[in-house]
Image: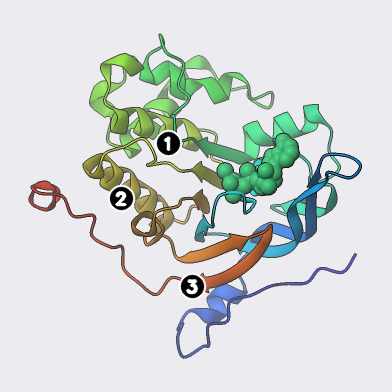
Amino acid sequence: MQIEYQTHSCLPTQNPNWMHYMTQKPIIQIINLSKIYGLGDIQVKALDNVSLTVTEGEFVAIMGPSGSGKSTLMNILGCLDRPSEGNYLLAGEDVSEMDKVQLASIRNQKLGFVFQSYNLLPRVSALDNVMLPMLYDNRNNTSEEEQRSRALKALEQVGLAERVNHQPHELSGGQCQRVAIARALVNEPVLILADEPTGNLDTKSSIEIMNILSKLHDEGKTIVMVTHENDIASYAQRIIHFRDGRVDCDQPNGHKPVQLVQEGVDHEMA
Ligand code: ADP
Ligand code: MG
């Protein structure tokens, strides 16, 4: 199998850390990947021969018009679906041919998910929601006490130490999304996948969530996020645009986050 590494077009002069960048460990390698839906005459090529690499510590935003293949890509990256053709290596391991049971285990151990609608269990405390991935981890031989302390640490990381016993209905949307981020972190995944993480949030909560994702990026986490908002994408380090199931444009993001301006928020966040 020939692996074609796709790199940024940025020149060394534009990116002083390019040597460092080129030597980073690949977390996502997708190679000639296609996804075809349907049979017979009405086939839809949702992904059309896509190859790309995301390395450890990158924060990537995926953008593109409706129908361009973003959800299909996220489903494959999240091991929820398999490609029709091509390969997907996650942290060096080829997951393209794995069966459902193996994929479930990879999802639990290697991936953290943040969804637009939080997907928390409703009548369960924040702490128990965050402990859930550890319950399903079949490698896990840690005591309940250790699991509890890891969940508390994850909730602290997202600034929710004071709310650990609250249930989702007692929390704001932004706080629910912070619980979801803590849950995504707790098994120490190699990759965090965020699908429109601020899609249900007001401006102030969106800023809080993006600041948390930026902090995680600064700490070295690898994040891939789908968004259709330029302001939200501006927090990422690299922006990939899809069109008709192909990469239309893949560029480093040279801009600082666009200020999401809302009256009062700037002062409050300062
Ligand atoms: P996006 O998330 O960018 O809006 P999708 O990945 O959902 O795009 O869809 C890409 C293309 O694949 C679209 O033409 C869509 O209609 C088609 N598609 C997506 N899911 C299915 C499916 N389960 N069956 C058939 N076609 C699908
Ligand atoms: Mg979609």
For mark 2, give the secondary structure.
Answer: helix
User: Label for residue 111?
Assistant: none
Instruction: Please tell me which residue is depicted at 13% across the width and 47% down the height of the picture.
Output: 265
| Distance from Cα at disc 2 to Cα at disc 1 | 12 Å
Mark 3: give few (<14), some (14-19) or many (20+) Cα within 10 Å: some
Which label lies toward us, 3 or 2? 3
Q: In the rendered image of this protein, does residue 105 appear above or below residue 36?
A: above
Give x and y (percent) for residue 92. 74, 55
Mark 2: give few (<14), some (14-19) or many (20+) Cα within 10 Å: some
Q: In the rendered image of this protein, does residue 38 appear above or below residue 191?
A: above
Query: Residue flagged by tag 1: what amino acid is it?
Result: Ile
Give the mark, 3 or 2, whose residue is nearer the N terminus: 2
Q: Depth check: 145 or 5 in front?
A: 5
Instruction: Please tell me which residue is depicted at 45% across the width and 35% down the height of the picture.
Output: 116
Name the quadrant where ligand 2 sits: top right
Give x and y (percent) for residue 23. 62, 73
Q: Is residue 76 visible?
A: no
Query: Residue flagged by tag 3: what amino acid is it?
Result: Pro
Instruction: Please tell me which residue is depicted at 35% across the width and 18% down the height of the picture.
Output: 168
| Distance from Cα at disc 3 to Cα at disc 1 | 25 Å
Find residue 201 and report its image quarter: top left
Position of residue 92 in the picture relative to residue 142 (left or right): right
Give the mark, 3 or 1, whose residue is nearer the N terminus: 1
Mark 2 lies on residue: 211
Which label lies toward us, 3 or 1? 3
Give the mark, 2 or 1, whose residue is nearer the N terminus: 1
Mark 3 lies on residue: 252
Give x and y (percent) for residue 82. 78, 41
